[in-house]
Image: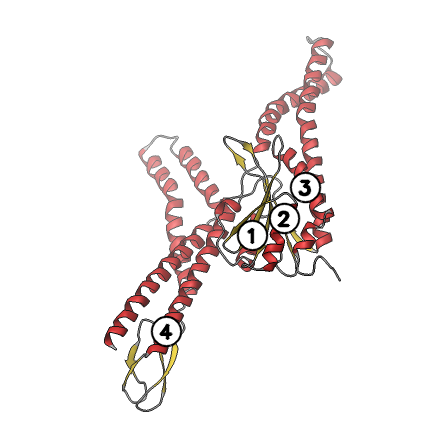
Amino acid sequence: MLEELHGHTRRVGEVERQAEHAKEAATFAELTASFGGGWAALFVGSWLLAGLVMLPNTAWATVLALLVFAGPFFAVVVVGRRRLARIRARSDEGPRPVPVSCPGCGGQSELLPGQPVRACRYCGGALAADGPALEALIASAQAKLAGEQRLATEQRWRLAAKQGAAPRTDLVPFFVIGGIGGLWVVGAIVATIRVAFVGLGESSVGELALIDGVAVVLSLAVGTPLLRRRRRLQRWRAELEACAAERDAALSHRLDAFAEWLCVHWPGELGGRFIQSAVGYAFLAPRSGAAWALSVAPVAHADHGVEPHLRVLVPGSEGAHLSAAEAVLERAGFRVSAVEGGLVAELEVGGEGIVDSLERAAAQVEALRRGGVLAQLEPSGGQRQ
């Protein structure tokens, strides 16, 4: 009996250590995700302010600049400790107790996985878990571990959604050229107005025409691609809205919506590489049920340019439904992989640049919609009441 209890204690101890590790991982992920982009702005602002404060180049100015510089670090520590205490207090749930009967008085007591032996609350006699009770205690500890691991996975998904939103780098050339060209255009407008009210002065008509001509060329060089970009994005969004309306699906352009869908519907693990977004990111999922989810994530790679993926996720365990879904997606040209939690089907979309790729992706989404691929993934076979 003692040897059995010692073995049980060792097993429970190992499970509890794993549960504690998973709990700390979940806590760290949730704490990290709680600090948004405003904190980055605070740090940058404090550094700029510290540089201005140091301009007098005196001892007091240096001390004050150091205080301004260190202020955000101190704020992060204070706020982080408070948030950490709240997170730990909220998630501090122990394993489920197992009821046992006292062999002496017959009173009902409870044992915990880490305490297989205790005194009866009624008669004070010794209570020790037997074989079935020991198995129930192990199951309780493993259920606690599974819960902590799931929570850690969900918090990692939420953190990945915060970190995976790529900036709109395709607009950088427009900002650079537009900024320089904008100064020229403003100058040309001022010069034209001045000529209209004051006269040419020392300038000639040819010089003014040259200035205005360059301004028009710069405006067209920046404005035309921006207009084309906007129209392509509008076509992309219109196709997504049509698909969402036809399949009664929720449409979101926020990566955290995808993370929340995973937390609710995806039963297994899913790597962080799937939780990334860029310009035009979109996520669709049926409002009722969890038969499928469509995620389009254009991701910029340093060596290979832009490689957007049209991803369809089908949650579930092994069964006829997943086999049928795999066959449907493979016929549609997807590369299907079976992962923990379901199927992940990917379709690479070519294109020169993100917006061009989204235009091609719009055609792919239209083909999925008109071909009834998403409808075939639903248990009802796409029948809508």
Q: Earlier in the sequence, mark 1 or mark 3?
A: 1
Q: Nearer the viewer, residue 2 or 96?
A: 2
Q: Nearer the viewer, residue 204 or 299?
A: 299
Q: Which of marks 3 and 4 is nearer the N terminus?
A: 4
Q: Dot 3, crowdedness within 10 Å: few (<14), some or many (≥20)?
A: some
Question: Which residue carries the number 2 mark?
Answer: 329
Residue at coordinates 60% horizontally, 51% vertically from top-left?
326
**Residue 32 visible from this viewpoint:** yes
Residue at coordinates 43% horizontally, 41% vertically from top-left?
43
Residue 206: image x %, image y %?
A: 72, 9
Residue 313: image x %, image y %?
A: 58, 51
Q: Earlier in the sequence, mark 2 or mark 3?
A: 2
Q: Earlier in the sequence, mark 1 or mark 2?
A: 2
Callout 1 touching callout 4 (CB < 8 Å): no
In three-dimensional space, the C-alpha distance between marks 4 and 2, rounded to whole angstroms, equals 43 Å
Q: In this view, does 326 lie to the left or right of 272?
A: right
Q: Which of marks 4 and 2 is nearer the N terminus?
A: 4
**What is the three-letter code of the residue carrying label 2?**
Leu
**Residue 34 visible from this viewpoint:** no
Question: Which residue carries the number 3 mark?
Answer: 364
In three-dimensional space, the C-alpha distance between marks 1 and 4, rounded to whole angstroms, equals 34 Å
**What is the three-letter code of the residue carrying label 3?**
Gln
Which of labels 4 and 2 is toward the front? 2
**What is the three-letter code of the residue carrying label 1?**
Leu
Question: Which residue carries the number 4 mark?
Answer: 135
Callout 1 touching callout 2 (CB < 8 Å): yes
Q: Dot 1, crowdedness within 10 Å: few (<14), some or many (≥20)?
A: many
In three-dimensional space, the C-alpha distance between marks 1 and 2, rounded to whole angstroms, equals 10 Å
